[in-house]
Image (tube, helix red, strand yellow):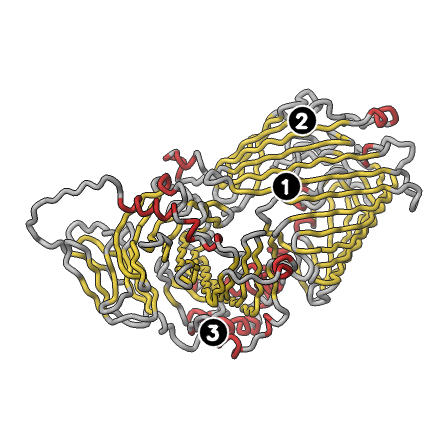
Amino acid sequence: MQRRFILFFITVLFLIYFIPGSYGQLTKIMGIVVDGETKQPMPFVTVMFKNTTIGTTTDFQGKYTFETKSVSDTLMASYIGYITKKSVIVKGAFQIIDFELIPVKLNLMEVVINPTENPAEILLRKVIKNKEKNDRKKLDFYQYEAYNKVEFDLNNITPEFKNKRIFRHFKFIFDNLDTSTINGKTYLPCFLTESVSDVYYRKEPKSEKEIIKASKASGVNNESVSQFLGDMYQNIDIYSNFIILFNKNFVSPIADFGLFYYKYYLVDSAFRDNKWCYKIMFKPRRKQELTFTGSCWIHDTTFAVKSIDMRIAEDANINFVQDMKLQQEYDYVDNKYWMLSKDKEAMDFNIFNQEVGFYGTKTTTYKKFLINKPREEKFYSTGSPVISLDSSFYRDEKYWARTRHDSLLKDEKFVYKMIDTIKKLPIYRTYVDFIRLVLTGYKESGNIEFGPYFNLYSYNKVEGHRFRLGIRTSNNFSTRFKPEIYLAYGTVDNKFKYGGNLMYVISKKPRRTFGVSYKYDTEVLGLNSDNLFFREDNVIASLFRRNPSDKLSMVKELKAYYSREWVTGISTTPGFTHRIIYPVGSTNLENSKNSITTFEFGLNNRIAFKEKYLEDRFRRVNLGTKYPVFELQYNCGIKNFLNSDYRYNEAIFTISHWFNVGSVGWSKYVIETGKVFGNIPYPLLKIHEGNETYSYNEYAFNMMNLYEFVSNQWISVYYTHHFEGLFLNKIPLLRKLKWREVGYIKSLVGNLSEKYKEKWSLPDNMTELKKPYLEAGTGIENILKILRVDGLWRLSYLDNPNAPRFELKLSIKIDF
């Protein structure tokens, strides 16, 4: 997948798009309607094609957009009290048509009507009252066929951008441009994926299942990508109180408490698919909240949503997204059940304002509904919730022609051809190598990759200047096994360090892997080696620290494991580890020998219900789950096996959970408890992870020094809440900065058994926990969209040597 994703990024970046035809299928119109005398924008104006039922209403800024295949040759704008205006249009082209409406000069007697309540709010209350009745989730069973299409386009193409030197080999790609009705920007399509799937739902016990029958993508032929872009992983439920976008809770316009967040206006009534409906427009009550602006049509009898057209509030506190538009249509199936029939999401993504960015458009249509016709029990309870048939990637064009719910546009058809074009360009290889280096840290050369670049140089007091070079095989070499080796050298200790590992993928369904590794290298005991940024051989972590990096040990380690995933998110991993620890730097082992040798058997069980991920041949990118994640790790030390010195048992249980908290941000907690059974020296106990760098580390105690506390039984609790600008958005001078508040607290309780203290002693400045350890902090994130500054306080053990009381830490955090 790595190569295919890089091909996708290259494609997006360099717009390899070659279309011999024109964009003549769609008529695209956008414009604004203003008062001809005051020049003020006019909301609620009806704009429609003459002699058709195709029309829309201007929004609160007087703007409107059309994108349709069926049009007449005349567009009209009308409003009560104004003279109707008409304009001739050009079919099959993009155009901007603005209207200035002239008031009608009439002398009428004044009539004052004072309603007791806003009629839109009366209607909204009926919608809320009938939500459960109209929501498809109330059904016991349903199934449907979904056709899903996702397109990415490069937008905001300027002459300056086209003339950049980097595109001197790609000039031909700018021959074909189109214009979006989202905001009038020019764009070039560069990525397209399609899928057809059958989706099944059961209410009790709740079960959702999607079987992908066909999948087709330009540049990406990967099952997990196909699943992620399918129907179940990307959907919006308008009947929920909150709509989750970019992991943030946006308040639905028909939320139970919608009146607290929105203003509503009843603006129209008309037949929609032979159903009499009322049109309500809505907008946020306050600035910079996660809300929408738009309109919806409500059925007059069932008070169900017939259709909705909305976009995120223009000033919402969200990064990189300049605009996002959501549209949904519902059909009354069997004259009993309201079912979603079409869903379209369009996003304008820009890292920097006014610079080249991306459009992302997802269109899903739903057909072949079956209501309350259950399948057998086994069908719902077995297998992964999202399954791709083996034949899904190999469907021919005849299959797609008869299966698509709607035919492709000309530009969409030719997106598939652009990938072959870019691969044939000689300069393609250069750009692929550069982007791979940035994204992965490795430079590919045929079957070999060199890196990672952030470990090439580091510094610590024991080794001095440390230089490291790693080599691993690429996917060109094998898609089953990946060997990797590295060699390092320190200029002070004048010693070579080395290591290597091998990963073998036994199968993908179910996922089964085997791995073995060996290393002879320095290590900070108790430090999480999986956190690459805070490892001692990371150049940034080694240079920006408050204490000298001398708490190192030399470790010789052989490790092997076997991992078996039973269902998605539930896995078991047994393995063994043989280690020999030698003291170096300022560490000592507090035993009669000059080394410690252990051999332990380990068993890890992890449960992450409905976890989502992207997967390549060897690695996974975890996309998380809305449920708590449970993990149980058991280790058993075996004495006298391969010269092992000690017998012991260790059990560690962890619960972690990420969740949104209504409209006030999101929270995360991590609870860990563990115990070590056995009379063993401190390097084999729990050395609590400190942080001596100037960057915030979520996985460590940030105000604790390395090697400061040790326990053989403990429990730690970490809780953080991100307020997403809840308070700062209310301060006028700070609102434009879009800063966001964050706070956290972390506590630790632990002790050492009396048996341990009778036999062993601890190094200088290391101690047991005789009372709870506490630290807390508050910070500002989203500074310049990428920086986070934390102020941290240590609340206990303030008299310990070199214990910091307060620190400022700077870290990089990129988020929507």
| Mark identifier at residue 656 | 1
Q: Secondary structure at mark 2?
A: strand
Dot 1, how many residues are within 10 Å of its Cα: few (below 14), some (14-19), or many (20+)? some
* Vertical order, 675 against 275 (above or below): above
Q: Residue furthest left?
A: 107
Return the x and y of residue 109 as percentages of the image width and height.
Answer: 7, 46
Residue 391's image quarter?
A: bottom right
| Three-letter amino acid code of the residue under disc 1 | Ser
Dot 3, how many residues are within 10 Å of its Cα: few (below 14), some (14-19), or many (20+)? many
Tag 3 or tag 2, which sits nearer the N-term?
3
Is residue 111 shown left or right of residue 126? left
| Three-letter amino acid code of the residue under disc 2 | Tyr
Return the x and y of residue 608 as percentages of the image width and height.
Answer: 64, 48
Is residue 433 shown left or right of residue 291? right
Q: Secondary structure at mark 1?
A: strand
* Vertical order, 365 against 103 (above or below): below
Q: Which residue is mark 3?
A: 414
Q: Residue furthest top?
A: 799
Q: Which residue is mark 2?
A: 773
Q: Residue furthest bottom?
A: 398
Can residue 12 be seen here? The reply is yes
Query: Mark 3 to mark 1: distance in Å?
Result: 45 Å
* Vertical order, 195 against 279 (above or below): below
| Three-letter amino acid code of the residue under disc 3 | Phe
